[in-house]
Image (cartoon, rainbow, N blue to C red):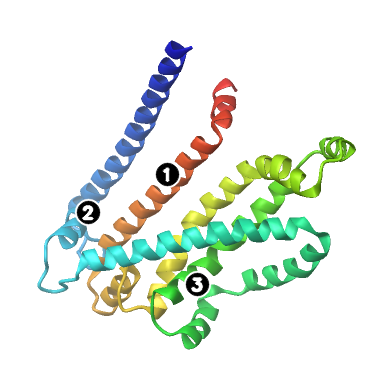
Amino acid sequence: MKKYSLKKILNDVKKGVRKNFQASLTIIGFFIFWQIIVVFFQIPQFILPSPLDALEHLFIPQESANYSWMLHISTTLYEIALSFIVTATVGILLAIVISWSRLIKDIMMPFFIFINSLPTIAIAPIILLWMGYGIKTNILIAFLVSFFPVVINTIAGLNSVEDDLLDLVRYLHGSKLQIFIKIRIPNSLPYIFSGLKIGSTMCIVGAIVGEFIASDKGLGYIIINSQFTMNTPPIFSALIVISIAGALLYGLVTLLEKLIMPWREIQTTNQ
């Protein structure tokens, strides 16, 4: 048994390394292709800077725009992390409350659909007037952008249990709370993680939109400020950091999914 477990662990490690290596090669190839295109066609820097120019602005202080990159990066990462935690917690709890009672669902769902249908860029100025500049405003905007997919996917998972199984548990005098804890919530885990994967990317979009409108620091602020000064390289530097942050957060959710649902990985492998 121990030998089998060790062998399985080694195989999983090899698969993970192979996938990460392939992904890394794809990303490196993209940056090389980007560099070649810029150099070969001699594209002006203000139109499309090369990756080396973008990284140079990121790591080497520039006289034209000497941004405090660590401050701006840490601010954006903090907003993304906190907004994702709030989105995951509140979204899952709201979905459970909505699924608990049909009456609650009929009352709350139209309200959530109404909120989600409002363009975030349109209501962001109103949020700014109410809450002012700061991280709280950006986190709230990120939450409003990303919570709906988490709620909808979780509700779908909670309601996807087979009726025969529910009838059997009720026949055995299982309570509503027991049905939720032992059947509905475990059954909804794949749906929850699907919603969290979508929410992880939407949190980043929401945080950057918030920084466009209601912040004097962060990567979104750098993008807007560089646009006004027609300084293109810092924009691409910020975009590179944002894309890396998005990939890391998505990978973290995927890793958490594998740890909480190891049986799903086994089913996928067998198929």
- The structure residue drawn at horizontal position 71% and vertical position 72%, both measured from the top left corner, is 111
Q: Amino acid at mark 3?
A: Leu
- The structure residue drawn at horizontal position 83% and vertical position 40%, both measured from the top left corner, is 166
Q: Position of residue 94 (x, y in %)?
A: 66, 61
The residue closer to the viewer here, 33 or 74, is 74
Q: Amino acid at mark 2?
A: Pro
Q: Position of residue 32 (x, y in %)?
A: 24, 44
Q: Which residue is mark 3?
A: 140
Q: Is disc 2 surrounded by few (<14), some (14 to 19) or many (20+) residues within 10 Å?
A: many
Are circles 3 and 2 on residues that touch, CB within 8 Å?
no
Q: Is disc 3 surrounded by few (<14), some (14 to 19) or many (20+) residues within 10 Å?
A: many
Point out which mark residue 230 bears. none
Q: Amino acid at mark 1?
A: Gly
Q: Which residue is mark 2?
A: 51
C-alpha span from label 3 to label 2: 33 Å
Q: Which residue is mark 1?
A: 251
Quadrant where the C terminus sits is top right
Give the number of marks: 3
Whether residue 214 is situated above or below residue 91 in the rendered picture: below
Secondary structure type for disc 1? helix
